[in-house]
Amino acid sequence: MKSVPVSVRTLLRAAMLVGLFALVFAVRLPYLSDSPYGYDSWRQSDTEAMARNFAEHRFNVWFPQLNYQGPMPNYAQLELQITTGLIAVLYELFGYHYALARLVPISFFMGSALFVYRIALRHFSPFVAGLSVVLYGLLPLNVLYSRAIMPESAALFFYTGAFYWFGEWIARGKRSLLFVSALFTALAVCEKVPAVFVGIPMIVMVLVKYGWRAALRWELWAFVALALLPPYTYYRWLGTVAESAFVSGIASKHILPAMASATHAKEAWAFFASELPKAFTWCGLALFLLGLAMALFRLRSHLAICAWTFAMLVELATIVAVIRFNYYLVFIGPLVALLGAYALGKLFERAWTSGRARKLHKAAAVGIVAAISVLTFESFATVAPVIGLQNEEVIRQAAVVGRYSASDDLIVTGTDDPSLLNASHRAGWRVTNSNPEDPIAELDYFVREGAAYFVPLKGYIDGDPEGRLKMYLNERFVKLEADTEYYIYKLR
């Protein structure tokens, strides 16, 4: 039997697709070796520190350890440590290199880009799918947090995979695909609880296919159990072993009580007005809204995508409006790309099928290039001032700690932000955290607990506007590197 030769057109499409993914990957390579002490230093450095703690102390992803609140262990109720576990493996194999740490989230993001492409291919067209990859890869929020040493990229990978595999099960009916989606959903929720909102479009898809008879299908109840019981069990169990109270029960303590009134708060509106354009660009938001309007106009054909969009708008209004961290916007990013690409692709399609095809085809092509160029320019304007910045003060201050202290020495940092503690690769405490009303009594407590050094940040101490704590340190303890700006105090 003769084999059918692959057409030139197929090879060209494959080459173009590889080129698009290569472009998305290449955009993330500048400053790959930068430390976590840049944008979102708190979250990046905590993640990197947990990976180091796996490599140096206890390598068990069920027991994540932060550096603050005293000597090890400092177990914390945090997301399932997939990203940090992989980074720790790379650290043990190849040594401590920040580029290795960044390649882990970048790899997860590339996987999520593949799912975005496959979702667009199922719901739209190959042309829209290619545009989706471009937009998804260039949105400034995605550029920043796909390469950040944080769990957001892993969450995006499992979250987009959950939607994709569920859609495949709806289309093909194979139960194995449903259970793959359940696994992805469970891992997505274990990484970031707001990923649970992906269940809303899943419910819509099931009701469209089965109606109320869906309640009688055992495999759907198995899906719910497999998707939700593992993350519920994980977070409840980890809450029983967590020693670091600072990050425990964030949802119950901060998010749930404020959800009902969050959308009415002027702080939430100010946050969205400021952060959405920076996250997705004005051009990206305009294309998203245009694509959403087009999809709603053909709701029956695009019900799953519209339901997914609705779900993530609800997530914005309930979760993000309360927590107000820009990286919590990542879950609507795939939809900004998908619907923005749909808008561009639909305009091109209408021009192509017009009676004046050639002229309109050229105009549409120019319009698509112009829109992507504007989005790229806006993205560059947002990312460029941030991506290469490093907090040199934290890095230099930490270097002094490394010169004078041993790896098992406990330190106290003069900042509430743990970045300096993490940069020093030491466990210990942050000042003004336990007893902000009396920093001297707090310091005496730390000394009794075994603190060996006090580390201000270039002489600065949080919560000491009158200089009482600094005066106490100068009177009672030896100052090391006293002739520089980056001095530290020896406490014992």
Image (cartoon, helix red, strand yellow):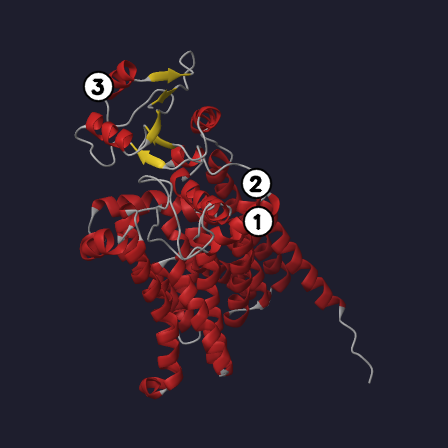
Q: Is residue 95 visible?
A: yes
Mark 1 highlights which residue?
90
Which secondary structure, mark 3? helix
* Residue at image coords 43%, 40%: 45
Question: Is 11 in front, or is 361?
Answer: 11
Q: Choose the circle earlier in sequence order: 1 or 3.
A: 1
- Three-letter amino acid code at disc 2? His
Mark 3 neighbour class, 10 Å CA radius: few under 14, some 14 to 19, many 20 or more:
few
- Three-letter amino acid code at disc 3? Arg
Query: Gap in Å between the C-alphas at discs 3 and 2?
Result: 40 Å
* Residue at image coords 82%, 85%: 1
Is 264 rendered above or below residue 49? below
Mark 3 highlights which residue?
468
Q: Disc 2, disc 1: CB below 8 Å?
A: yes
- Three-letter amino acid code at disc 1? Leu
Mark 1 neighbour class, 10 Å CA radius: few under 14, some 14 to 19, many 20 or more:
some
Q: Position of residue 386 (x, y in %)?
A: 46, 36
Could you tell whether 196 is left or right of 81 in the image? left
Mark 2 highlights which residue?
97
Please tell me in which quadrant of the rendered image residue 368 appears: bottom right
